[in-house]
Image (spheres, grey):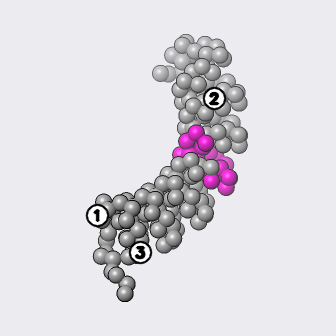
């Protein structure tokens, strides 16, 4: 659909609202965006935030609550927005500009595979990640016997990602 087709099919403000309530990304074609219209759009699909011309904290919060990965479109990230995003979807960590150990922990506890987006891995973060999803072992930079055992206990398919044979410390 292009702009002319949208204008023809949805000529009124009420039509615009109905369109974004059904398909949030239709916000791209709305010429005069109101807060209510934008809230409806990001409430339906957080990624509609990409098409919001004037972002507010309220709009950004609504977008990341709907889909944490919409954080990638937030122009001014705050610690609270980042926490809301990774709490909703750990993979949102990929878009966090200023990662903290706390945000990383929330992300990997929500989705162990978010470990691939952690810039500063620690043994504790890696352990939390593989306990949530053993297959996160694929993204562990420094494998230890403890991390490997935890990954295998969570999902034996993680065996294919063991780079070194974990030794039994005795």
Q: Which residue matches tag 1?
A: 160
Q: Quick one: label 1 or label 3, which is nearer the N terminus?
A: 3
150 is within the stretch colored magenta:
no
Real-space CA distance between mark 1 and mark 2, rounded to the nearest whole angstrom = 45 Å
Residue, x 39% and y 62% (percent of image)?
154
Q: Which residue matches tag 3?
A: 146
Q: Does residue 168 sit above or below 119 in this rendering?
A: below
Residue, x 43% and y 63% (percent of image)?
130
Q: Secondary structure at mark 2?
A: helix
70 is within the stretch colored magenta:
yes
Q: Which mark is residue 10?
A: none
Pick the quarter of the image with the C terminus: bottom left
Residue, x 67% and y 24% (percent of image)?
32
Asked if residue 85 shows in the view, the reply is yes
Badge 3: few (under 14), some or many (20 or more) residues near its Cα, within 10 Å? some
Image side of residue 57 versus residue 141, left or right = right
Q: Secondary structure at mark 3?
A: helix
Please name whichever residue, 25 or 86, is drawn nearer the observer in this view of the structure.
Answer: 86
Q: Which residue matches tag 2?
A: 40
Image side of residue 141 versus residue 101, left or right = left
Q: Does residue 79 sit above or below 32 in this rendering?
A: below
Q: Which residues are magenta?
A: 64-83
Asked if residue 94 shows in the view, the reply is no
Q: Secondary structure at mark 1?
A: helix
Q: Quick one: label 1 or label 2, which is nearer the N terminus?
A: 2
Q: Does residue 29 sit above or below 157 in this rendering?
A: above
């Amino acid at each position: 659909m292009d702009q002319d087709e949208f204008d023809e099919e949805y000529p009124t403000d009420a039509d615009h609202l109905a369109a974004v309530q059904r398909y949030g990304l239709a916000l791209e074609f709305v010429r005069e965006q109101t807060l209510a219209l934008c809230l409806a759009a990001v409430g339906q699909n957080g990624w509609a935030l990409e098409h919001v011309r004037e972002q507010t904290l309220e709009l950004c919060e609504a977008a990341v609550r709907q889909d944490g990965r919409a954080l990638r479109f937030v122009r001014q990230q705050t610690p609270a927005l980042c926490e809301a995003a990774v709490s909703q979807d750990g993979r949102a960590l990929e878009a966090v500009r200023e990662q903290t150990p706390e945000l990383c922990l929330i992300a990997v506890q929500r989705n162990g595979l978010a470990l691939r987006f952690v810039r500063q891995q620690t043994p504790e973060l890696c352990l939390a990640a593989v306990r949530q999803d053993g297959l996160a072992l694929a993204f562990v930079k420094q494998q230890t016997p403890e991390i490997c055992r935890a990954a295998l206990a969570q999902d034996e398919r993680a065996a294919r990602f063991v780079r070194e044979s974990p030794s039994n410390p005795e």
